[in-house]
Amino acid sequence: MGSHQDLDEAFAGYDSDGNGRIDRDEFGRLLESLGAGLGEPEATAAFRDIDQNGDGGIGLDEFRAWWKVQRR
């Protein structure tokens, strides 16, 4: 994923209910599509880290910030 637009489009593609947030299952599918190479335990831990308020969803800005760090 080279650009913010590409990442935004990928995120939107997995935001199945269109609420601007993805849940844990959507997050796992998004990571797979991006070739993140995280196993289930790592993906679960990453989701928990990103979802700091514990409401069960992460927004695009949160995901973008996390993804940027992961790609370094």
Image (tube, helix red, strand yellow):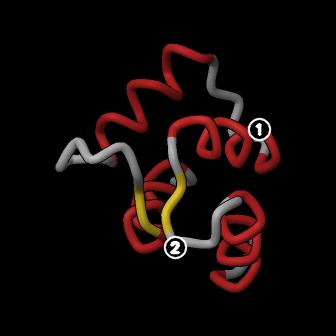
Query: Is residue 1 at least partly visible in the picture?
Result: no
Disc 2 to disc 1, how far (Cα)? 19 Å
Residue in view at x 42 percent, y 38 percent: 47
Furthest residue toward top: 41
Is residue 64 positioned above or below 71 on the image?
below
Query: Is 26 placed left or right of 72 in the picture?
Result: right
Residue on which disc 2 sits: 20
Query: Is residue 63 at least partly visible in the picture?
Result: yes
Residue in view at x 41 percent, y 34 percent: 46
Is residue 47 positioned above or below 6 on the image?
above
Furthest residue toward bottom: 5
Could you say which disc has been placed on residue 19 in the image? none
Q: Position of residue 9 (x, y in %)?
A: 75, 76
Q: Do tag 2 and tag 1 residues touch (Cβ < 8 Å)? A: no
Amino acid at circle 1: Glu
Amino acid at circle 2: Gly
Instruction: Indicate which disc, 2 or 1, sits on the residue closer to the N terminus.
Output: 2
Q: How many marks?
A: 2
Residue on which disc 1 sits: 32
Residue in view at x 51 percent, y 46 percent: 23
Q: Nearer the viewer, residue 45 or 53?
A: 53
Q: Secondary structure at mark 2?
A: loop
Q: Residues within 10 Å of mark 1 (few under 14, many from 20)?
A: some
Query: Is 24 placed left or right of 61 in the picture?
Result: right
Q: Position of residue 3 (x, y in %)?
A: 70, 81
Q: Position of residue 57 (x, y in %)?
A: 40, 51
Q: Secondary structure at mark 1?
A: helix
Q: Nearer the viewer, residue 22 or 66?
A: 22
- Residue 2 sits in quarter: bottom right
Is residue 34 positioned above or below 17 on the image?
above
Can you say which quadrant of the picture contains the N terminus?
bottom right
Q: Position of residue 54 (x, y in %)?
A: 23, 42
